[in-house]
Image: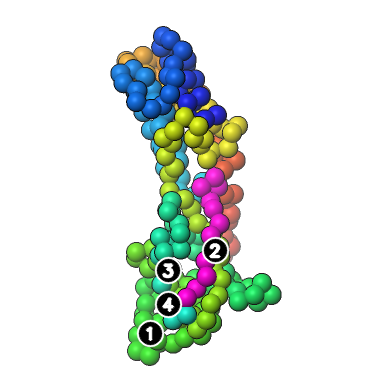
Amino acid sequence: MNYLALCQRLRQEAGLSGTGPTSVLSQTGEMKRVVDWAASAYEDIQNLHATWRFLRNDFSFPTIASTQDYTPAAVGLTEFASWIKEDIRLYSSLSDEQLLEYHPWEIFRQAYFIGTQRTQTGRPTIVTVKPDNALALCQIPDAVYTVNGQYYKSAQVMSANADTPVIPTRHQLIIVWRGLMYYGAYAGADEKYTHGQNEYKKMLFALEYDQLEDMTYGEPLA
């Protein structure tokens, strides 16, 4: 469903008169509230978890010789939330691709941002994430390599009629039910709020089961 269709379904579930909205743009009054409720519901759902599978995306960029740091913006990631730190790879050709060893920033800083370690060049084998979200490589690249991996995108915003959610199609009605809760709270319509809440909870359970990583267990303590 696109943004406009979601808004029309929300108006229908709320029991509001008419057949609109006819567009998500330039609305006023009641239809403006419907459009805003759908948009807010979509952002709310995305922000519930930082690790939704539907927010995962691939990245790849070439290093620059003698350049250690690479910010998300510098490598073309405009909707960036966080790196998936333990799965960052590097290669000069596909035959020599290797997983970079991730070190937390404070450990990396103490080990490699001191003395002559600061200027050592070579093929990188270690990566960290600096406080500004830049990837820092060690050693400093001595040539052009390809770095690739995955990252989580920030919450997406719908603004045009044809915009579609990144949430998988079979789960997209969750936006309508969350939006209906907004309507119910605004209008003092307890029955609508409760109906929206009940449907939202059912769909959220299914979405979390489908789009969150499987739980893993550590080794026994004894």
Q: Which of marks 3 and 1 is in front?
A: 3
The mark nearer the N terminus, 4 or 2, is 2
Q: What residue did someone put label 3 on? A: 70
Q: Position of residue 129 (x, y in %)?
A: 42, 67
The mark nearer the N terminus, 2 or 3, is 2
**The magenta stretch spans residue 56:** yes
Marks 4 and 2, how far apart at CA: 16 Å
- Label 1–label 4 contact, CB within 8 A: no
- Label 4–label 3 contact, CB within 8 A: yes
Q: Where is residue 93 in the image (x, y as percent from the top left)?
A: 64, 75
State the SS at label 2.
strand
Marks 2 and 3, how far apart at CA: 12 Å
Q: Residue 60 carries which label?
A: 2
Under mark 1, the amino acid is: Arg
- Range shown magenta: 53-64
Q: What residue did someone put label 1 on? A: 118
Q: In terms of image quadrants, where is residue 192? A: top left
The mark nearer the N terminus, 3 or 1, is 3
Marks 1 and 4, how far apart at CA: 12 Å
Residue 206 visible from this viewpoint: no
Under mark 3, the amino acid is: Tyr
Closest to the observer, 200 or 134: 134
Closest to the observer, 157 or 110: 157
**The magenta stretch spans residue 159:** no
The mark nearer the N terminus, 1 or 2, is 2
